[in-house]
Every structure is written in structure tokens, then in C-alpha cells.
Image (cartoon, coloured by chain):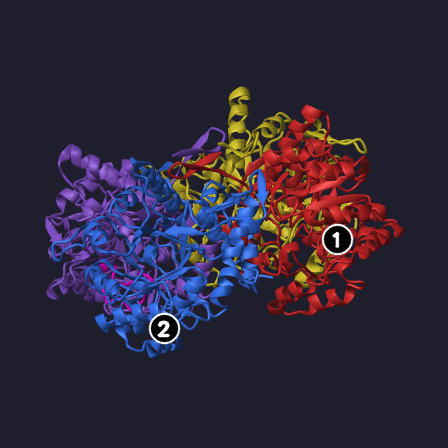
Chain colours: A yellow, B purple, C blue, D red
Amino acid sequence: MAEWVGIGRRARRCYGFDEIALAPGKSTLNPEEVEISWDFGGKNFPVPILAAAMDGVVDVNFAIEMTKQGGVAVLNLDGVQTRYDNPSEVLDSIAKATPQEATNLIQKVYTTPVKKELVAKRVSEIKKGGGYAAVSCIPQNARSFGPIAQEAGADCFVVQSTVTTKEHIATKYESLDLTKFCKDTKMPVIIGNCVTYDVTLELLETGCSGLLIGVGPGAACTTRGVLGIGVPQVTATIDCANARDIFYQKTGKYIPIITDGGMRRGGDVCKAFACGADAVMIGSAFARTKEAPGRGFHWGMATSHSNLPRGTRIEVGISGTIEQILVGPALVDDGSQNLLGALATSMGCLGAKTIKEMHYAEIIIAPSIQSEGKMFQAMQRVGMAK
Amino acid sequence: MAEWVGIGRRARRCYGFDEIALAPGKSTLNPEEVEISWDFGGKNFPVPILAAAMDGVVDVNFAIEMTKQGGVAVLNLDGVQTRYDNPSEVLDSIAKATPQEATNLIQKVYTTPVKKELVAKRVSEIKKGGGYAAVSCIPQNARSFGPIAQEAGADCFVVQSTVTTKEHIATKYESLDLTKFCKDTKMPVIIGNCVTYDVTLELLETGCSGLLIGVGPGAACTTRGVLGIGVPQVTATIDCANARDIFYQKTGKYIPIITDGGMRRGGDVCKAFACGADAVMIGSAFARTKEAPGRGFHWGMATSHSNLPRGTRIEVGISGTIEQILVGPALVDDGSQNLLGALATSMGCLGAKTIKEMHYAEIIIAPSIQSEGKMFQAMQRVGMAK
Amino acid sequence: MAEWVGIGRRARRCYGFDEIALAPGKSTLNPEEVEISWDFGGKNFPVPILAAAMDGVVDVNFAIEMTKQGGVAVLNLDGVQTRYDNPSEVLDSIAKATPQEATNLIQKVYTTPVKKELVAKRVSEIKKGGGYAAVSCIPQNARSFGPIAQEAGADCFVVQSTVTTKEHIATKYESLDLTKFCKDTKMPVIIGNCVTYDVTLELLETGCSGLLIGVGPGAACTTRGVLGIGVPQVTATIDCANARDIFYQKTGKYIPIITDGGMRRGGDVCKAFACGADAVMIGSAFARTKEAPGRGFHWGMATSHSNLPRGTRIEVGISGTIEQILVGPALVDDGSQNLLGALATSMGCLGAKTIKEMHYAEIIIAPSIQSEGKMFQAMQRVGMAK
Amino acid sequence: MAEWVGIGRRARRCYGFDEIALAPGKSTLNPEEVEISWDFGGKNFPVPILAAAMDGVVDVNFAIEMTKQGGVAVLNLDGVQTRYDNPSEVLDSIAKATPQEATNLIQKVYTTPVKKELVAKRVSEIKKGGGYAAVSCIPQNARSFGPIAQEAGADCFVVQSTVTTKEHIATKYESLDLTKFCKDTKMPVIIGNCVTYDVTLELLETGCSGLLIGVGPGAACTTRGVLGIGVPQVTATIDCANARDIFYQKTGKYIPIITDGGMRRGGDVCKAFACGADAVMIGSAFARTKEAPGRGFHWGMATSHSNLPRGTRIEVGISGTIEQILVGPALVDDGSQNLLGALATSMGCLGAKTIKEMHYAEIIIAPSIQSEGKMFQAMQRVGMAK
């Protein structure tokens, strides 16, 4: 796996979704008979898909609708929903900004401080609507927001930063003790993001209920360009799934891993499960729904950094409802709708009856481009060639 | 062949047509003296090319014309030809739809049920016109349509689905027993599609007369994007050809394999034979003929799925007759016409006197793009650069 | 070098110019002191570059001018120069044809038969002008045109077809015996094209004075797309240079090999020499000269095939004189002019004093694209991105 | 690392910035607590970034401003600053030239000879403004300009050519003895450019204070296209860093290496340090500043060659100040601004407290394109796709 990249230095070749495909096995199944539900935090969810904690994707209403569909949406406690009593105006202004103005406007909007009372209020609103209240913040805010959210009745807490490790070194502030935080928090805690075997093992020992896998792959994220950091999702998911299995063998505890980011189409979702994911977290595809607060736009969590923005506002348009994205009917043929139908059909074609059997589907290396023909087809699809 | 794609997980590198080329050998032949005919179902066909069972490609008239040229065209029994007494109107409306409307219209058109009397009628029409009547349907319809087609005088029956395996597991309906179906059917049966050595061996044991090789490569097919499933045709053809040869060594029965999909130009056809194909099945190139019912358009068989369309209507235009596509004269220089001339010339340059000798031509790995120069040339061809 | 491309089948990875680069060595030289002349047919030529036998590149006048510059131009005896007393009109009409009409027009123009008296006339005209008369034809015409050209005073004869092997099998006509032809012909004979070690060794045994290396790489050639055949020039040149050296060790005869096609810029020419070429043959770059008869257009020799055209008329424009292409001054910075200056400077940077020392320059594998940055730069150059 | 590229010939696979990424480690750090300063010539500089000796990037004023920011700018003594008393008019005319005229105009502008009095004057002007006076010239001019610059109070002298080796062979002029030059020069000497282990070791023995690493990677440089020469920066930096470490182990002298060219974004800068760079030299990013003399344009040093130009004038526009490029706030999200913030954040995410610890960050091979998805994203960024 490791190749020489210079004298005395080797590097692993890592793979992304577009570089692999799934190969059929020896039997096929009726897609209507496959089982795609997953267990998390002592509860079974029919839909193994989470909506990402992005301000263009999840608000209170979206979380309630996502719960109705059987999935989970995570509300960002560091964003516009907790900075503004009425975030509609702000979201309107972001949607109306020109591409040139967008990053600066987002930087400015996020200088208004978070109001703690809004943290509790958003949780209560989701609960009142019958929703599953999953909320997230960065490690620096977890000690403060965690208890407030818990008090307000939240169901799940997500501690999320670009790269999370058990050990974070700082002399100017006290680092968050993740083990203590998981112990002190009564609801299930998800930690992220990580991409390596070692860190997965360490984070699983904190007592968390789930891990987010992925650094740098999302469409609205420019971490790789700005920081040079990123691990493609196929290798990241396989490595972390391996650590999950080892941890399960040692402890008897099966903690699900959630591949987060970089899945544009149903095929990418299917590949994530074949790589070992128990669930997937998706941003862009949900940003396209009528229910999303972004009005056809979305942007990464690091876009708002005042000194070093690491995200882009992307115009995705509005193309369907949450229900269409999840169970169809698909009005388009590009794989961006009916993700659960795609997953079930893929599992049927591959002979996998459950997500755990899907973890053993055969992966092949088969770059989707790298050839004139595929390039031509890609260009045709984006209207660059006939 | 297998490389590490993550900790504890290996994957084979598979290859597509654009990633290989054929290298000349030690002698050359006069192209006019090569032999390209193939044997199928106890009959010798001068042309080792089949037209795909797609509604934009084959109707009764097309099948008759293709027979005159020495080849075989397969009529789709699940499509517009058997759903509508007069399919012309429907085909007109599909051709006139805007790109935005096309998928939805195709979904709607295919909700009209198949009329069994039309199954028999189409077969009879082909026979009356002197054509070789090859017809196809999905496994669920085979027990019903097979006897009707046989009764009506069909010459060949194709059972085709995205991924076909000998074992298909379902509790809600009875799976098709392929061995029994082949035994009960008096005409030769072709089964497809498959892409692996193991499944090829199992399917050959059903008593079929031919296999279709290919999952996900065609231009009008989005299986890879939607389901994540696909095996590039070079590796798929080599693997299945190997199984065919092993089966022949064991049983003395030589069952031809037909590479289906992903061949845009003469060069791709030549490569398929060098990989071990006995014949090839082509869609897009024939959709461009004057005889094709698609009026310059074609679409994949899964485009019509009501809940999860997996195909695209592609505008290919009309650029020649079946005869021009097969034996020229080519009016264009891009390899899309005179496919048999290209095959014969290629065999001459490679010193292969027969298709079986062509199976031993030297393959090299030589990506057609991956370089600025080739990219530039590709862009020139599609008018993106000067 | 060989990788598995399917079960039981391996293939060599072959490389093209855009996939390699040259790495500096331990010393550098003053570029003005390197030696780039080459020996061919008992004569020393200051310029190791030949102009290709293409109708858009070489006519009588071009050959005379090329001789003045120290190089060699090959006149095509199968083309318009010997089919028409006054080829100007024909060349005008080809230049004025629309892209749609071009292939058909070229097909039609080449149906007029070659006049043997024009073979002799063109040779005489070159000699009268003080030029080195190198002429070429396909193997089928060699027995007829060879003696005529020799009689008329030709200096060099080139027998050229897409793929040439010592053994050509045909029952309907008598194959050209290359050994006999070389023996019977008093002037030096160049044979081409070939791309493999084995065939190079066999062709060197015919008694020829030079070999052309290259199948399918040229910009105006669509052999790879139409026939699937092609070997990238880096591997082809290295393999054939190895055969040349083995032949030299066995026989004491050093027969130069000439890399033919696929070199767009000075850098490609430098790489060809580093791969082992003794000289290079170039088409497109010379088609751009004021002296070229193509009026800013050129096309491959197989473009004219009536049934299976395998070339494209490409508009290259007119950008300088033969002198500028060879020795500058370059008015552009893309490496298409002052090829000899580029070669000398490259040799200086690499510390190679002679072409034979250049054969030992270090090659590295470094794809020129395959990365977003390089793709972006390529797009900038063709005006697709800012 | 070496692969067969032809019979009897192997080549190393070398890597560029776009083909690798950095993978997070086991701990993270507060980015505000990392240490990025570097030591050069007995002095500590807070900013490990140098501005390249290009006429569109550095003039007297730019050098003074760069010093204020803690970095170093190198003034080109072979360019317009020393050829013209008032270079403003010349720079204006270059900026106003059409793309067609630019190369020719630059060729013409550089025919005016360098005035030695301007060498001294520019150094004095930088010193008077409180700047660190680093100046550069080609080896042929070093013996003449070195003493003049030293006399005028220069702080650092750079001897730079496309490819520099300790041994340069010439009979028509006396080669520069680099060891003698370093000995005779009292200020620290930087030599460049080199890309290999062997040459780095030899050049370190000359007594220089720093080395420039990089041949052919820059955006304004066409060396690879014109001469075929180039080594991608990841492999070049790793190889040369290895030689630096070996030299340090042998001699106890730690001589910094400076990766020069090919870094477009913060991520590329981070990768250069992870490959072993002690500092980086950047052209294009600084050409975009308000302080740069190029008025939104820049061009390579070899663009002016009268006979063989090897550079391109590129329009980069004006997008910020030196301060914004270095420490932000970034107004854009593409990684081209706040390079030091990006470096510190990357080091924090990777758990590297110092540049020397950054040398041990994990590199992975993960091509940034090569896939349809990434290609699509790249096209979106340049406005070619939606």
C-alpha cells in the first residue's frame, strides 16, 4: 500500500469514491426484502442517513420532517439558528448575496455572538414538533452548550471540529476532556471528525455512541486546498471501520461509524456502506430540498472563519423534498434522489441482505474518469460537449 | 492485481477500453483475408455484432434489416413495441420532449402494461420480413413471454437484467429457474448480464447458448452513478472469457460470450475481441442509424423505472445506415462507422486471421487521457479548444 | 512492468511523452557546445529532424528549403503531388472545405490515380533545386515506384505503412520482400512504422538504413480510436532503441531509429532523444510553416481511405518559417518553435554533450496532468479558464 | 519506486503537490501556539516565506514592505530594475500589451543592458527603506554583481539559474566556481535551482547558506514544455531534504532548503513543509498584491530569452496586500490568502509544534483529480460547470 514518494519516504495510496466501484457477487436478492435500518444510542432508526449540521441544511422544521422520514438531522448550535432570534432574514441575505459578496457576508453574519437561551429554545422547538433533537457544537463550546441542550430535552449531542483527536494540546485554554464529557452527558454523544485507525480506537474509548468519519471531502469544504489536509473517504471509512470492529472484538461494544461528506449520488452512499459505514451524513443533497433553510444554497462550517475562511457558499438549487431525496420517486436519473431506493437496489444486486452484509461487498479499483470516453461523458453531462 | 485500499481490505484494479490499447505482433495480414464470422446456437453468422434490446434502437423493421446485413438485432419485449399497438406516436413524443421532460415522460410511457398479443405479433412480423427473431425480457417475464415468443416462431430468447446470477433470493415471488427455463425453451437462450468468472461458470451450467457481459458501462446507463455498481469491460470480458474457456475444457461445449455496452468506436470493438469476446452487443452506434426507431435518441432500459430511473435519454443524432455502421463507406473519421472494416483492418495489422486468434492479440496498458496533450486533443475533438 | 488486467491475462504499462519528464544530472554544459548532428546512409546531417511524408507538409519547395536548413523532408509519392500535375488547386480546395466536407473531399481527391511520370518529375524537381530527395510510398507501390525514383536521382526511399512487419501474409497478391527490396535499391531505405523490440530486430536484418518508430501517436491520426492499435512513444522508442543497440552489438552496424509522431513541443522532441531516438520525424509543427503546402491544414495519410478513413484534417494555422521552427527566434513561448535551440538547451541542462549521451538522460514518471492544478493550467492555456 | 518504462529502462515515479495530501496524526494543537519562524544566515526570520526574484513581483518598495512583515523578498539584478533608471514606464507597457504582443515586448525590453550603477542603487534604496536586501543574478553575472551588491550593503546574494550544478562545463567562457564565490562573499549566499539528492549534497559543500529547490513547476514557467525537464516538487523537496539531513549528520551544519515554485494555495505551502522544506519561495501569489510592481501581471525569468523564450506573461489580477497574503484576513476562501494562518492551522490539525515537527507529518497519495467528481468540482470553481 505504501509507495516511495521520495528518497527515504513512503506514502500510502488512499482512495476516494470516484476511484472505486462495487462488483456483483454470486447471488442477487429482491431489493424489497433487504434491511437497511441501523441502531444508534439504544434506538433503531429505519433510515441510516443523517443530515449534516450545516446552516443551509438543518433548522427546527427540517429536523422535525427528517424525524418523520425515519432519519436524523443535526442542528448546528454555533450557527445562525442560535445567533439570531429570527434567522430568516439572515438566511435571505446570504441567499441573495452575489458570489463575490458571499464569503464576506457570511464572515460578518457569524460575528454576532451565540445566545445561550436560543440553544435551549431550538431544542425545545424540535421536541415540541415531535422531532428527534440532535444538536452539535465545536469542542470549545461543548462544556457550555451540552448541559443546556440536555436540560432542554435534547436526544443526541455532537461534538464536531475539522480534525478531532483525544489529545488536544493548548496552554492558553483548557482542552475538552472527551471521556469526561461523554460520562457527564446523559444523551448519546457523537464525536468527529476523524479519519484514521489509531484515532478511531482512542475516540471509541471515550465512551461515545458514534463517530463521524471524514476530513476534507465535502463539496462546500476547502480544507484540502487551504490546509493541505484530507483523506479520501474510501480509505478513511475502511480504516475506521476496521478499528470499530477491533474495538467490538475487545469490548463487545459495537459503536457505529458515520461516513460524513463527499457523497454526491446514490452510488457514493452505496460505496460508503460497502466500505464499512453504519450510517452516512450528507449535506449537499439535503441542501437541495424544499425544507432546507438555505434557499438553494449551502456553505461549510468553516466558511465563517473571520481570518481564514475554509468553505464556499455553493448554489445547489432546489430540486425536491426530503421524502424524494430519501425514498423517491426520483424525477431525475443522476442518482441524487431516492437514496434509500438506490441503496436497497444496490444491496439486492450485490446479494447483501443487511448493512452488515453490505460491509463485505466486493470493491474494485476502477477510476471513473482517466479516460477520454468517461471524460467526454462527464462533459456531456455538464453540457460542455455534445 | 489486488492493491490495499484500506487497512485489511484489498481491491483488484480493473480496466476499461480507454485504458488499454492493442500492440502489433510479429506479422501482418491482408485485411481482406481475415475471417470474422461467429457461431451461435448451431448457426454461423457473418457479422459478430448484435444490436441491443433498447427501444431507441430495435423495432421490427430494424431487426429485418440487421438480418440482411448478417447480424442479429434483439427486440425488447418489455418496452414500447409490446405496450403500444402503434408505437410511432410514443417514440415521436419521446424524441420531441425537452431534456427536462424526457425522464418523466419515459417513466409515464412505460406505465402502460405490456399486451401479450403484441409479443406474438412482433415476432411474427420479424419472421414475415425474413428476419432472425431474437427477443428479450426481464427474468420476471420470461416464464410468460418465452412460450408465447416460441410459439410465434422466435429464433432466440434473451433473459436480461442489470445483474443476473443463477441464485436470486426472494420470498415474495418465485425466482426464475434459469436451468429449467433453458431446458424448456427450444430456441437458443442468451442470459445476461454478468461480469465475473464465478457467475459466468454457474450461468454456463444452466444450458444457455450465450452470455451477455457488462454491468454499467453503456453511455445511456447510470447504474454506476446510482447504485455504485460496475465493472469496466476489459477486465469483465477477460474474466468471463477465461471462465468460458475453462467450461469448454471441462465440457467440450464452447458457449460464446457477448460483450455488451461501452463501445463507442471501432477501436473499442477491436479491443473487446482482443479481450476474448466472441461477439459484441452495441446500442448507441445503432441508435444513430436511419433505420433505428429512436429518431436520433436512445435511452437505457432502466430509464423507465418509476421510482428510481437509472438511465438517460441521450441525443445521438442520425448519421448513417445500418450498412454504413457495419461495412461503410465511412463518411466520418472517428471510428463510429464501418465497424467490420475496422475489425478486419485491426486484425490484419495484428496478424490475427480469426476471431479466436484475435483473442491472443497483445494488450498494453496505455491510458488514452491522463496527459495534457491527449486532453487537449480530446477537447479539440469536442470543439472546446483549438 | 506487466500488471494483471483480468484473470490469467497480464499487460505491460506503456508510457507516452506527457507521462514522463527528464531529470537534471550532476553536471551542466554550455548549450552552445553540444553536438546534435546525426549520421544516416553514410552522410552526416546537422539537423536530426525529418519532416513527415504528409501532403499538407512536404512538397518540392519544402524539401528544398528543409535541405538548406540541414534537415530532411520526405515527399509522399502516394498523394496529391503525384496524382495531379498541378496540385495547388487541389490543396486550395482542401483548405477551403468546411470541417464537415473535409474528410469526404479528401477521400474523393485521392481517387485520381498516381501518374508514374509525376514520381520521376517530383524527384527531379527536388534535385534541380539542390534538395535532398527523400520519397516515400506504401509497400504495395514500392516495387513500382522504387526504381522510378532511383532512376530520377532520389537520395533516400521510405517504405511506410501503419504497421510494418517483415512477414506480411496475403494470398491475393505478392507481399513485398523487404530484404530483396533493400538489396535491389541503391539509395538508403527507411522502413516503418514499427513499435516493438522483436519487429525492430527483424526489420534491421533486412538491410535497411533506418527505421520509423510509432503507431498511432500523431495528432492527425485516429488509428487508436478506429483500430484500437497504438503504443505510446516513450515505451516504443525505448524498446526499439534497445533492439537497435542489440543489433549493433551483434553486427557492428548502427542503424538509426527515427521516432515518428506525437511530438507537439520542444520538450517532446527532447524526451524522444532521451528515450533513444537518433532522429525524430515531425508533421504538425512543420504543417504550420509558411513553406508547407497545406495552407495551415494537415491530414494523416490514412484520411483518404475510401472505406475506412483513419485521419482528420486539422487546422493548425501558419505561425512561422521552417527556419523559425528549427532555430528560432521563437516568437511564442509554448515550445513549438526553435526546436534545435530547445534540444541544445535541454542537453546543456542535462549535461549531455551528444545525442548518444542524451540517450542516457534520467527519465522520471511525472504525469503532466492528473491534478487539478495542472488541469487548470492546461485550461488556462487553451482559454477555458482564467 | 522505479518502474519499467520500456525494455531495459526503469524510471522513478515522482509526485507533485496535487497528488498528495496530509493525514491527521494522533494529537492536535492550538494553532496559536505553533512556531513557524526559521533560521537563515545566522538570523531568525518570523516568516518562512520568500518572494521570488521576478520582475512582476519584487521591486525596492516591495522588498521593504516584505521585510516589515517578517519575510524576505529577492530583487532580480538581471531584470528591468537594473536595466532602466525608471522601470515604471517599462512595467506599464508590459502590463498594457496584448497577450499576443507580450512575449515579444518582453524579449525587446530585456535587450537594454544592465547598468552596474543601478545594481548598487537598488541595494542602497532597499537598505535606506529599512529593508533586508536580498538580490539575485544568473551565474554568469555573479562575479561582477556580487562585489557591487556587497559594497552597497546587501544582506543576501542569490545565484540562480534554471538548473544549477557544482560542475558546469564550458570552453568558451570560465564557469563560476561556486565554492570560491561563497568563500569570497561575506553575506550569506543562496544557490539554485536544484532538484536531486546528489546535486544538493555537492552544492551544500560549496559553503552556501541556503538552496532553492525546484525545476519547472511554476505557473509562469514553461521549462517542462519547452525543454522536457522538470521534477515535481513533492519528490524534489523530499529528496533534497534528505540530502540536507545527511549533510547535517556529517558536518553538523544545518543549511535550510527553500522550495521554490508551484505552490498556488495555502495547502501547497503546508505540503512543502511536510515534505521537508525550511522555507518556501513564492511568485504568483505575491504578484497579486497591491505592492507588486507587475500591475497584476507576472512572467518567468526565461520569458525574455531572445531566441528561446521559456516563460509566459500571466494575468493574475490584484487581490490584496502583502499582509493579507501572509496573515489575512482572507477575503477569499480558496487558500490564496493568509498563508501563515493556513500553515499554523494545518500544523495545529496535524499536531506539529514546529516546522521541524511538520517535516514528519504523514503524507498520503491522494490525487486531487482523476475522478469525475473532483473534475466536476474543479470545473465549478473555474465557472465551466454548475
Instruction: Tell me if I can see residue A293 in this picture.
Output: no
The disc labelled 2 sits on which kind of residue? Gln
Which numbered marker is on residue D77? 1
Q: Which residues are magenta?
A: B327-341
Q: Quadrant of residue D40?
A: top right
Q: Chain of mark 2?
A: C
Residue B65 picture location, percent across and down = 18, 65
- Check the image and report above or below for A82 versus A331: above
Q: Residue at x 56, y 63 (%)?
A: C329
Which numbered marker is on residue B7? none
Magenta stretch: residue B335 in it?
Answer: yes
Q: Quadrant of residue C293?
A: bottom left
Magenta stretch: residue D273 in it?
Answer: no
Q: Chain of mark 1?
A: D
* Residue highlighted by disc 2: C100
Left/right of residue C264 with respect to residue D153 in the rendered view: left
The disc labelled 1 sits on which kind of residue? Leu
Give neighbour class at mark 2: few <14, some 14-19, many 20+ (Cα, 10 Å). Answer: few
Q: Residue at x 71, y 48 (%)?
A: A79
- Check the image and report above or below for A333 versus B248: below
Viewer-side label of 1, 2: 1
